[in-house]
Image (cartoon, helix red, strand yellow):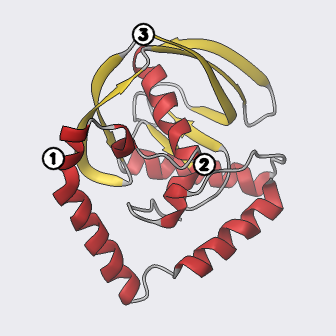
Amino acid sequence: MEIVAFPHPALRHESKPVKRVDASLRQIVRTMFDLMYEHRGVGLAANQVALPLRLFVMNLAADPNDGEEHVLINPVLSRPKGSAEQEEGCLSFPELYAPVRRPEAISVQAYSLDGEAFEGDLDGLVSRVVQHETDHLDGVVFTDRLSESHQLAVRPTLDEFELTFQSRRQVGEIPDDVEIADRLTQWEREYC
């Protein structure tokens, strides 16, 4: 398992709700945490490891020995309040940072890995991370939310990501779109 980089098709795939949690899925979640920590991230959505499952992992400390680990399965966001612009980055866009405007506060309903339903009101960094990761589950990446001027500013970097992706695909490191779509469908059959 690896973190896929833009413009990998899995990043644009709308995730399906998870209907089943088993030992294999628990191991996938553990591996997602390990990858997130390895890359010093605070959140990682299943799309970012080319899985079409509606879940993400999060630890605001970005450290396995600090903070709290959270797994959100089938999150639903509601009641956005306020608006704030803050710099964001993404593990699927290495070393790219740009200001994103999002609601300051939201409500979330989700399930834990143990199937327990929970809901809460979030603000600050946790609100931003939950919104960013939920966007991934909807096939939305943070650069989609940039102002027009910031989109123009990051375009050369996105072009570099696209060239790297095509080069990796040409040497067989990344499968073609049909093979990726087939793999996503297999995962959906198993867990959604």
Give the residue drawn at x 21%, y 55%.
Answer: 155
Amino acid at the residue labelled 2: Arg
Foreground residue, 167 or 58? 167
Label 3 – label 2 distance at C-alpha: 34 Å
Q: Viewed as shown, does residue 12 lie left or right of 182?
A: left
Residue identified by numbered label 3: 82
Q: Viewed as shown, does residue 151 lie left or right of 25?
A: left
Is there any visible trace of residue 137 in the rendered image? yes
Q: Residue 153, labelled with which disc? A: 1
Label whose residue precedes the other's in the sequence (1 or 3): 3
Task: Determine whether the residue tagged by mark 2 lies in a helix, strand or loop.
Answer: helix
Q: Position of residue 63 (x, y in %)?
A: 41, 35
Amino acid at the residue labelled 1: Ala
Residue identified by numbered label 2: 30
Q: Position of residue 25 (x, y in %)?
A: 72, 53
Give the residue drawn at x 64%, y 33%.
Answer: 72
Q: Which residue lies furthest to the bottom in this view?
A: 171
Q: How crowded is mark 2: few (under 14 residues within 10 Å), some or many (20 or more)?
A: some
Q: Which of label 3 and label 2 is nearer to you?
A: 3
Is there any visible trace of residue 40 in the rendered image? no
In this rendering, the answer to whether 63 lies above or below 68 is: below
